[in-house]
Amino acid sequence: MTVLELRDLVIGKLRGNGVLSALHHELSQFLDVSEGLFVEVVLTDASRIPEALRAMDEVIVELQKQHVSLQHVVRAIWQVDSVENKGVAYGSQGVPKSAVSFAVRLSSGNRQTVVRVDVSVMALDGLKTALGIGEGSGAWESVGAPVLNSLVRDYVEYQLGEGGLSYWDPIKFPVRDLSAAGMSYLLHKRRESLPIGVGPKA
């Protein structure tokens, strides 16, 4: 089966399940890779994922008849609506963690969800060092806290932007951890837009 034939088959099944209108044509992929055929279905509305999954089940049945293997991903485009600092983070057993928890509200078409991002104390220390904010400095509330909120947004948007087999499903996996290494990466990307007068030393 060619890639064009695969695309036509998938499009037909999506149309038959009434979900073609939610397909993001530019981000969706139909590929022939070394492991076989690969399809990435990207939707503009996460509430339509169940229909898209049914469509892909039908595609797999058709391909099995032809002894063709297929890897596939069905995901949605999410946007970050808000980021809120919730204070000390707690683990699954209710034990406090060395981290600060953020509630991040997401939306995708008619579907909304809330994910939690736990920012480690080491990540916070890295941010304070980068901004030149010492312990007990009054600059944290006016400078550091807004930058932290913005970086948490950046982190979530970056995670959501990853496609392919490594994509993040915020509904299935609603908790993420922002480590010191992750903070360092975000600061490197944002080094030109950090508040004037502070920032990582060269």
Image (tube, rainbow, N blue to C red):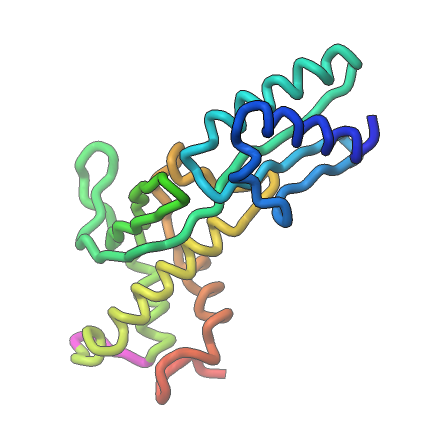
Residue 120 in the image: above or below residue 144: above
Q: Where is residue 113 in the image (x, y as percent from the top left)?
A: 32, 41
Q: Is the magenta stretch mostly helix, strand or loop?
A: loop
Magenta part of the chain? 132-136
Residue 55 in the image: above or below residue 144: above
Q: Which residue is drawn at 54% across and 48% down?
A: 162
The residue at the far right in this view is 2
Quadrant of residue 181 within the rendered picture: bottom left
Horizontal side of 13 relative to 35 (left or right) equals left
In which quadrant will I find the N terminus?
A: top right
Horizontal side of 158 relative to 73 (left or right) equals left
Q: Position of residue 155 (x, y in %)?
A: 42, 57
The residue at the far top in this view is 65
Horizontal side of 21 relative to 116 (left or right) equals right
Quadrant of residue 74 within the rendered picture: top right
Q: Is residue 74 magenta?
A: no
Q: Which residue is drawn at 70% across and 25% down?
A: 70
Q: Where is residue 156 in the image (x, y as percent from the top left)?
A: 41, 53
Q: Where is residue 124 in the image (x, y as percent from the top left)?
A: 31, 64
Horizontal side of 72 relative to 68 (left or right) equals left
Residue 176 in the image: above or below residue 16: below
Q: Front-most of 71 and 182?
A: 71
